[in-house]
Structures are given as structure tokens and as C-alpha cells.
Image (cartoon, helix red, strand yellow):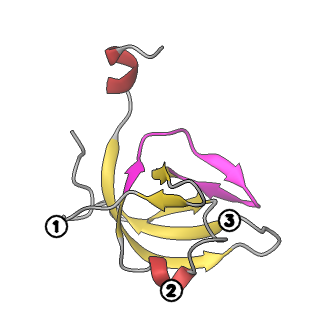
């Protein structure tokens, strides 16, 4: 069981997907370039390519975990994690109801 202190260590932010592309050699991964209000967009991998085309993802505002340690994946570095709900047959990326600036903190 996680404590409130464990939860408070995580940094959740909004991000706007600027670019998306299927990862060559992977049946699951899509590489996203996500603006989270920093000077440079983040490179984030997500295992959702079976359910969403790259074109569907571009322009969406999503929720990410911004302070995870970067992880090497498919020869590149993933710099965060896209959050998604378990939709039964497919994951459903978490988004916002109203427009929000990239980098807004989730409380």
C-alpha cells in the first residue's frame, strides 16, 4: 500500500502531443513528442499503437507522470509516462475536459 508521502513524490502534468509515430520493430509502441511547458518537448513511449493511430493522437492534451527516471526503450529514451485508464478491451489515455496549457500541474 502506498502512503500519501509516496504519492506526493509523483509529478503529474498536462501535455500536448505534438508528434506521434509508430516505433519500427514494435507491435505495441508509439513514440510521442509531448509539450509539457518546458523548453524542449519530451520523448515519451506508450504501448497504445494497437488502438490509436499516430494521427489520432497528435493535438490531444494528455496526463503524464513527469518526474520518472528516464528509461531506455527501443534505442531511445522515454522521459515520462502517459497515463491511461483500463478500458477493458483497450487502454484509454487520460485527457482533459477543457483546454489546459501544457505543463499544468495535476493536483
Residue at 27%, 56% (x, y): give it.
Answer: 103
Check disc 3: other Cα within 10 Å, few if <14, some if 14-19, many if 20+: many
How far apart marks 2 and 1 lie (CA) works out to: 21 Å
- Report the mark closest to the observer, 3 or 1: 1
Along the line of sight, which residue is nearer the eye, 93 or 16? Answer: 93
Q: Give the residue at the far front of this rendering.
A: 88
Q: Are marks 3 and 2 in contact (CB under 8 Å)?
A: no
- Relative to 96, 30 lies left or right: right
Q: Earlier in the sequence, mark 2 or mark 1?
A: 2
Of helix, strand and loop, which one carries label 2? Answer: helix
Residue at label 3? 29
Q: Earlier in the sequence, mark 3 or mark 2?
A: 3
Q: Is residue 8 above or below residue 61?
A: above
Q: Is residue 68 above or below residue 78?
A: above
Magenta-span inclusion, residue 76: yes
Q: Are marks 2 and 1 in contact (CB under 8 Å)?
A: no
Write down the quadrant of residue 54 in the picture.
bottom right
How far apart marks 3 and 1 lie (CA) works out to: 27 Å
Residue at 77%, 68% (x, y): give it.
Answer: 27
Residue at 60%, 71% (x, y): give it.
Answer: 51
Check disc 1: other Cα within 10 Å, few if <14, some if 14-19, many if 20+: few
Residue at label 2? 55
- Relative to 42, 39 lies left or right: left
Image x and y of residue 71, in percent: 64, 46
Boundaries of the magenta span: 63-80
Magenta-span inclusion, residue 74: yes
Image x and y of residue 67, in percent: 43, 40
Of helix, strand and loop, which one carries label 1? Answer: loop
Image x and y of residue 3, in percent: 38, 13
Residue at label 1? 98
- Relative to 33, 89 lies left or right: right
Amino acid at each position: 500500500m502506498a502512503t500519501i508521502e509516496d504519492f506526493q513524490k509523483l509529478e503529474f502534468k498536462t501535455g500536448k502531443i505534438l508528434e506521434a509515430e509508430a516505433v519500427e520493430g514494435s507491435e505495441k509502441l508509439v513514440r510521442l513528442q509531448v509539450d509539457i511547458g518546458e523548453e524542449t518537448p519530451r520523448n515519451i513511449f506508450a504501448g497504445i499503437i494497437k488502438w490509436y493511430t499516430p494521427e489520432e493522437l497528435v493535438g490531444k492534451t494528455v496526463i503524464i507522470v513527469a518526474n520518472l527516471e528516464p528509461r531506455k526503450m527501443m534505442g531511445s529514451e522515454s522521459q515520462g509516462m502517459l497515463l491511461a485508464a483500463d478500458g477493458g478491451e483497450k487502454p484509454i489515455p487520460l485527457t482533459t475536459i477543457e483546454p489546459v496549457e501544457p505543463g499544468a500541474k495535476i493536483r
